[in-house]
Image: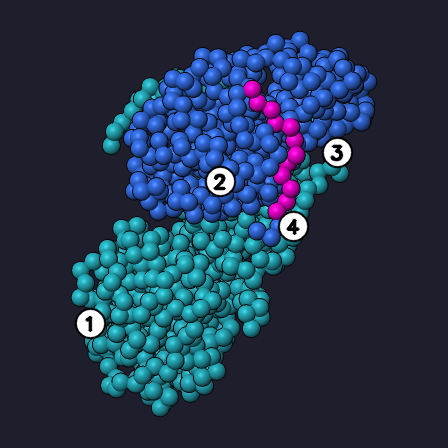
Amino acid sequence: MEKVKIKIDGKEFEVEKGKTILQVALENGIKIPYFCYHPRLSIAGACRMCIVYVENYKRLLIACNTRVEEGLEVYTDHPLVKENQAYILQALMTRHPLDCPICDKAGECDLQNHGAIYGPQEQIVPISALEKHRDYTDWESDFLEYYSNRCIVCYRCTRVCDEVIGAKALYVDERGFHSNIVPAVRPIDTSSCEMCGACVYVCPVGAIISKPFKFWTRSWLLKSVTTNCSFCPGGCDIRLEYGVGDWRSKEKVYRVKPTDNINVCARAFFGYDVFNENRLLQPEINGKKCEKDEVVSEIVKILEGSKNVGIVLSPYLPNEVIETVTEIGEKVGASVTSPVADHLFNILDEVGDSDITIEDFKNYENFVIVSKDITSLVPVVSYYLKGNIYRIFGEEGARDEKLNPINIEDGELKNIKGRTLIIVDPLLDYKQISKVIKNVKRKKDFDILVVPRDFNALGLYRILKGKNITPFGTFTKALKEGYFETLIIFGEDICDYIGEEETYELISGIKNLIVSSPFSDGISERAHVKIPMALFGEFEGSAYTFMGYINFERFLPWSFDQKILWEEVAKNITGEKGMTLLEGKEDMEKLPGVHLYRNNWITKRSALLGKLYEKVCSVNA
Amino acid sequence: MKYLPNILDIKAETTLNLLLARAKKVKTHSIDEYIESGGYKALKKALSMDPKEIIDWVDKSQLRGRGGAGFPTGKKWQFAVQNPPPRYFICNADESEPGTFKDRVLIERDPHLLIEGMIISSYAIGAEKAFIYIRGEYPAGYYILRNAIEEAKSRGFLGNNILGSGYSLDIYVARGGGAYICGEETALIESLEGKRGHPRLKPPFPVQKGLWGCPTVVNNVETICNIPIIVEKGWEEYRYIGPSEYPGPKLFPVSGKVKKPGVYELPMNTTLRELIFKYAGGTLGNKKIKAILSGALDCFSADELDTPMDYSPKGFGGTGTVIVLTEEDNIVELCLKIAEFYEHESCGQCTPCRVGCYEQHNLLKKIIKGDASEKDWEAFVYINKHIQPTSICGLGAVAGRLIRQAMEKFPKEFERYKPTVVKY
């Protein structure tokens, strides 16, 4: 990389050519205020707040759009800069309602922060509060709210929606001072909007806010931890914010925000209410809360005393727990399965495991989506599909239409030239997929990526590979015949695949039912021994996601350490029976349908996502 | 064509008989009439020339852009051809400056002059697609140009293999949506691409990355109409028209309180006084001139009547628009109109202009109404001064200019409105 020497405020820097002044300043800790710039978005240059004085040209230039060149001399504290920054802040503040005490953004608002540092602390145009009205278009949403008089028209929201998410749900109406951010279709809940909340996050002021969060707490009362989401294999980096909101509430999760990479979807942004409702936070034996040691000895007693043990593993477990439970299964001679063991494992066996992450997507020119709707399956994958998009088995009206895909037949695959990534949805009919895969395997430039529905399904596959795993179809048949005396179920995956009522019927005859679930109702209501299962932020461990191999941290104060519990069970059990493989080859009865807002058993429990789901479905019906 | 709106019925006079040779008559000249009076000769000559030679001629002719900024056209073309094809050529017919109607007269009365100029220009820069972006409020011009393009196609001046030269060109006509800002070349390009009419950040300039990311030349209607003249006469002869530094004919739309408002084609060494008194017949009722506005850009007082109508720093500059005000006019109320214009036409992209233009208009309204306090007056002056330094495009740069000049040149007028009592 070619290097150039520039001077900022008299200090010399040697930087890469092609960078902007603002990038250099941010990297070196020089403070330049800005509103419309965002590292993930294109340059708008609209707010003009990042002006600097460039000595070489003897004029003011915006730092976000000026590339560095040899000998550039930049001043961020020139009197002209100070004067015009003060003017811009005054201009933004003139008709701003200054309603910080009731604004959700207060405390993390750029206008508030910059106003305090760079602005004059007075109003230049004498305007009364009554004159601060601005034209307003109601978004008619239950989830997003727009305040036009707080808006500083930085175009971050429209840019993030067009460039990152691709939903193109927002546009700017009118012109000049009357510019207004307006959804393309109202109510916005029923439009192409994916409710990812990216516009709420990028808004530098409180113009777009999340209604479920509105008025519940203040931003400075919350503890914010950067972690990864475990609702789907995307594994997006997000920020979980929790704490005590006010004197009425107990400690809970208040919101989820993306990081500056803006990898977020509705499930993380609005689905956080699963953290707060109907949670199972302490182990229970026969309806009585108890300590960890009691449960460990109870499980060991059950497992050692029973003949036929079945274990249903969940792809929502971290690698460590899967390993430990597999070890337990091997010791007691259990039949181990997982609902994904049939369709997903078969395809992965055929295609071969690949460790392509979202970062690698930029190496491909073409993408072929072999799915009904990849956006509903794993939304974050659709944010990174930049290139020629083709689609096989696509459905009309699916969310993928935002990518403007070209519909093709599997025979046309060979006409595609250049580096191509085939994105396969394992929830399709297995015969259909294998036909496509056969066409693809012969070509050199083609790579295949299987996108599972469930969080750590890839980890589950990698750990269980080569072990005696009972197919799920055979397992349920044995379950129906009353083969199992003891059954350990992780999560509620099983309900997704064979139906809720059917599951309850199947497990009703089990003598010892041990359930590990995050929720106190549903399947765990019927269990003799209940053990809490962790959502993200509540477990320590690792998982394979599209963001790569990720280590999760346990930081939520109410979390139960499931890892230690299963490790102690494994330690106390003796035996070397090896896993019992049930013979047979029954097909799965059905595969779950996937919806953007209700993807799996965890997100199905979110009241907010449920509301969204009903709203969208009622419009489409 | 079922419906054809009336064309503008206004006087057009010329001493040079170049741009307005035909357009001085109030009628739309057909292709036959155009060819009869020597039209499309320049095209034949140009097609026999090397494109580089044409650019060279235009550069040597010292033709400057007539859209207001006065950038040398030959230089612009030279920059464009440095970048690889495909290149595009765009005619900027989004003439929306207050009091400006010179392009309208050319388009409506002599469309083939524009089309001939466009073919030669496109040939010179190697563009195979050219666009005319015409203002939405010019319906007649739109239909006339569409018709003229069809006529030219039927005679083989447009389309595939023009006059057997092997060069092909298509011209498309696009209508604007009534936004002044779309006359700014990058906003025009955005609008042509189907996006919101926002000026782009520069660099890159349109000659580097313009329409759909390709090198693009955007020229004004009048500039393009000069091209056939340069090609036909040769650059040496063209240089003899008018003063040597600023050669070529220039159109001056004159309106306001004059006896004979209209478009005047004159060399650029004409002074403002000559234009108003010799050609436009003096002021209505022989009243004293108070001020002359150059569109919504500059304000000249009666002392500056000897300003030459050229692009020198002290010249009249801009589009050449002259709006004459006499002693009975109220400058401050006129400034309110200008402020209203800029408030209405600000696109809302950058903060200083979006808010500045709005507050400037509001405060001036308050001041004229007599409701203002001293603080309002201070704020008005403050905002007026600060719109320019940080705004993105030319609109923000001039949004406060005319009013500021008026305040400097007519302090007494403003003094009357200046609040003296602090009101609470």
For marks 4 and 1, give the one nearer the viewer.
Answer: 4
Callout 4 crowding tier (Cα within 10 Å): few <14, some 14–19, many ≥20:
some
Residue beneath label 2, please? Answer: B32
Q: Colour of chain B?
A: blue
For marks 2 and 3, give the one nearer the viewer.
Answer: 2
The lab-note entry on whether marks 2 and 4 share a chain reads no
Q: Quadrant of the C terminus of chain A?
A: bottom right
Callout 2 crowding tier (Cα within 10 Å): few <14, some 14–19, many ≥20:
few
Residue at 61% from the left image edge and 41% from the top image edge: B137
Whole-number angstrom distance, CA of label 4 to CA of label 3: 22 Å
Whole-number angstrom distance, CA of label 1 to CA of label 2: 87 Å
Whole-number angstrom distance, CA of label 4 to CA of label 1: 59 Å
Callout 3 crowding tier (Cα within 10 Å): few <14, some 14–19, many ≥20:
few
Chain for disc number 4: A
Whole-number angstrom distance, CA of label 2 to CA of label 3: 65 Å
Q: Look at label 4 and name its amino acid.
A: Thr
Task: Indicate which disc, 4 or 3, sits on the residue closer to the N terminus.
Answer: 3
Task: Indicate which disc, 3 or 1, sits on the residue closer to the N terminus.
Answer: 3
Please report contact status of discs 4 and 1: CB closer than 8 Å, yes or no.
Answer: no
Residue beneath label 4, please? Answer: A137
Q: How is the image coloured?
A: by chain
**Helix or strand or loop: what does disc 4 sit on?**
loop
Question: Quadrant of residue A4 in the image?
Answer: top left
Task: Indicate yes or no whether the magenta region holds residue B11.
Answer: yes
* Residue situated in front as seen by the camera: A187 or A229: A187
Please report contact status of discs 2 and 3: CB closer than 8 Å, yes or no.
Answer: no
The lab-note entry on whether marks 3 and 1 share a chain reads yes
Where is residue B234 drawn, in percent x and y? Answer: 38, 22
Outermost residue toward the front in this view: B36
Please report contact status of discs 1 and 2: CB closer than 8 Å, yes or no.
Answer: no
